[in-house]
């Protein structure tokens, strides 16, 4: 299948859009001027059911919808565009809105950027002790953009908000200098939009350095869902799989962190063949997704997705909560509802599907999981635990919040039992204080 991508400047060339309403086209233009838009012919031809548009979940996952901007922001952008403003004026209006959308949630820009020799490395993040994230500069785009993506600032041309690096030698030095680091996660964007020859320039130096504390290399990618031919018929597909084999041969574990948001993405011969070829290299495929209103907010969808993933040899990993950025108001559901979906999903699948963890908020303190609702001291409370924390001591620590059916994020929660603060509050403030170096996790 020949690859063909569509962005805001040429999306009207998509043949299937000829049959949709002018209001839908207008919304794509207006919202796509603020939030990034990109898709490709595989998504358009194979994943979207055009007979269900605009209600098709894959259409909403990849095409901007009017409701993804707040009403006033949509009206502002429509006015600017309709007035005949030039590109610079449109960009300035869009940037004003973007800056209101919490472009870097969970302290990514302020608190997660590590340092080498007193200099911040803006192509890396180090939030949890064992894991470093690296953003290869050639991988800061995707085969198609998910409309919920919390990395949307990477794609809108605001350079001050972007993470990217070409300096593989700094990555090697950082991992060598920080023996607590066991995992390097290549992320983006999508690292697998790069040609293999570029990806090699980042991975092979890590292998050649033979760093004893480095045990796992992870690659976060949506390519299996949006362009499975990357692993089958692309001109360097075999080279990519050979690189995966070399990771294994070097004594490192390769974890392919696959993003699947709907069962439709798992159907078809291409994705099954791609998964089969990846697994043959010795890599493990772990799957993750947020639970998203309009896309997959039902236990039936999640159960189908998990069963299919396991049948293909993948390992369910995380159910996330939609992050507090971008179009959160469009995608988010209450934490209580997310927990009910998770619980009902668990009840309808076998044990080998229950490697899924969640629902989990990747927020400022860490990965916070809602465990459910309980009665303690005659009080109805919400039970949480920290899966990962900025302080390693927080891992697996339970805590309680007042019952709140409307809470959608951890900042909506109040401590239970008339406590003044959560157990992590003081240490979090200490870690995030200006006097603490970002890479100090002790």
Image (cartoon, rainbow, N blue to C red):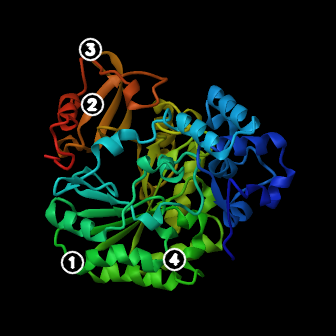
Q: Nearer the viewer, mark 4 or mark 1?
A: 1
Which residue position is annotated with label 1? 209
Q: Which mark is residue 418?
A: 3
Which residue position is annotated with label 4? 276
Could you classify mark 4 by the number of other residues whose Cα lies within 10 Å: few (under 14), some (14-19), or many (20 or more)? some
Q: Are marks 4 and 2 in contact (CB under 8 Å)?
A: no
Q: Nearer the viewer, mark 1 or mark 3?
A: 1
Quadrant of the image occupied by residue 272: bottom right
The span from disc 4 to disc 2 (Cα, nearest Å) is 41 Å
The residue closer to the viewer here, 310 or 171, is 171
The span from disc 1 to disc 3 (Cα, nearest Å) is 53 Å
Relative to 76, 105 lies left or right: left
Q: Earlier in the sequence, mark 4 or mark 1?
A: 1
The location of residue 23, given as percent across then percent down, is: 80, 39
Q: Earlier in the sequence, mark 1 or mark 3?
A: 1
Q: Are marks 1 and 2 in contact (CB under 8 Å)?
A: no
Label 1: element kind = helix
The span from disc 2 to disc 3 (Cα, nearest Å) is 13 Å
Q: Residue at x 74, y 64 (%)?
A: 45
Label 4: element kind = helix
The location of residue 102, given as percent across then percent down, is: 45, 36
Could you classify mark 3 by the number of other residues whose Cα lies within 10 Å: few (under 14), some (14-19), or many (20 or more)? few
Could you classify mark 1 by the number of other residues whose Cα lies within 10 Å: few (under 14), some (14-19), or many (20 or more)? few
Q: Earlier in the sequence, mark 4 or mark 2?
A: 4
The location of residue 232, given as percent across then percent down, is: 57, 80
Q: Are marks 2 and 3 in contact (CB under 8 Å)?
A: no
Q: Earlier in the sequence, mark 1 or mark 2?
A: 1
Q: Nearer the viewer, mark 1 or mark 2?
A: 1
Which residue position is annotated with label 2? 399
Label 3: element kind = loop
């Amino acid at each position: 299948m020949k690859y063909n991508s569509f962005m805001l400047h040429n999306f009207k060339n998509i043949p299937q859009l000829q049959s949709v309403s002018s209001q839908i086209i207008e919304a794509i233009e207006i919202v796509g001027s603020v939030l990034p838009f990109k898709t490709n012919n595989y998504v358009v031809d194979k994943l979207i059911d055009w007979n269900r548009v605009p209600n098709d979940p894959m259409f909403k996952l990849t095409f901007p919808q009017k409701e993804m901007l707040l009403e006033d922001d949509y009206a502002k952008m429509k006015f600017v565009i309709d007035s005949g403003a030039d590109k610079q004026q449109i960009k300035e209006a869009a940037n004003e809105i973007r800056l209101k959308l919490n472009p870097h949630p969970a302290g990514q820009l302020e608190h997660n950027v590590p340092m080498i020799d007193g200099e911040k490395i803006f192509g890396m993040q180090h939030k949890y002790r064992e894991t470093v994230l690296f953003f290869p500069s050639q991988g800061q785009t995707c085969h198609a953009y998910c409309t919920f993506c919390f990395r949307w600032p990477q794609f809108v041309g605001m350079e001050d908000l972007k993470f990217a690096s070409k300096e593989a030698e700094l990555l090697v030095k950082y991992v060598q200098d920080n023996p607590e680091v066991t995992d390097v996660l290549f992320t983006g964007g999508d690292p697998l939009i790069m040609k293999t020859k570029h990806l090699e320039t980042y991975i092979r130096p890590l292998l050649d350095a033979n760093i004893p504390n480095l045990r796992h290399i992870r690659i976060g990618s949506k390519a299996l869902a949006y362009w499975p031919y990357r692993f089958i018929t692309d001109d360097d597909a075999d080279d990519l799989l050979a690189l995966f084999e070399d990771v294994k041969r070097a004594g490192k574990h390769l974890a392919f962190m696959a993003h699947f948001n709907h069962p439709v993405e798992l159907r078809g011969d291409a994705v099954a063949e791609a998964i089969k070829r990846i697994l043959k290299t010795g890599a493990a495929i772990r799957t993750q997704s947020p639970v998203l209103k309009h896309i997959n907010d039902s236990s039936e969808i999640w159960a189908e997705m998990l069963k299919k993933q396991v049948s293909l040899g993948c390992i369910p990993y995380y159910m996330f909560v939609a992050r507090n950025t971008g179009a959160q108001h469009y995608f988010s559901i209450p934490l209580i509802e997310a927990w009910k979906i998770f619980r009902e999903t668990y009840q309808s699948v076998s044990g080998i599907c229950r490697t899924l963890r969640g629902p989990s908020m990747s927020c400022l303190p860490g990965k916070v999981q809602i465990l459910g609702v309980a009665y303690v001291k005659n009080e109805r409370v919400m039970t949480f635990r920290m899966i990962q924390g900025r302080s390693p001591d927080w891992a697996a620590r339970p805590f309680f919040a007042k019952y709140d059916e409307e809470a959608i994020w951890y900042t909506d929660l109040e401590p239970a039992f008339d406590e003044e603060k959560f157990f992590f509050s003081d240490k979090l403030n200490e870690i995030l204080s200006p006097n603490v170096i970002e890479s100090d996790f002790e």
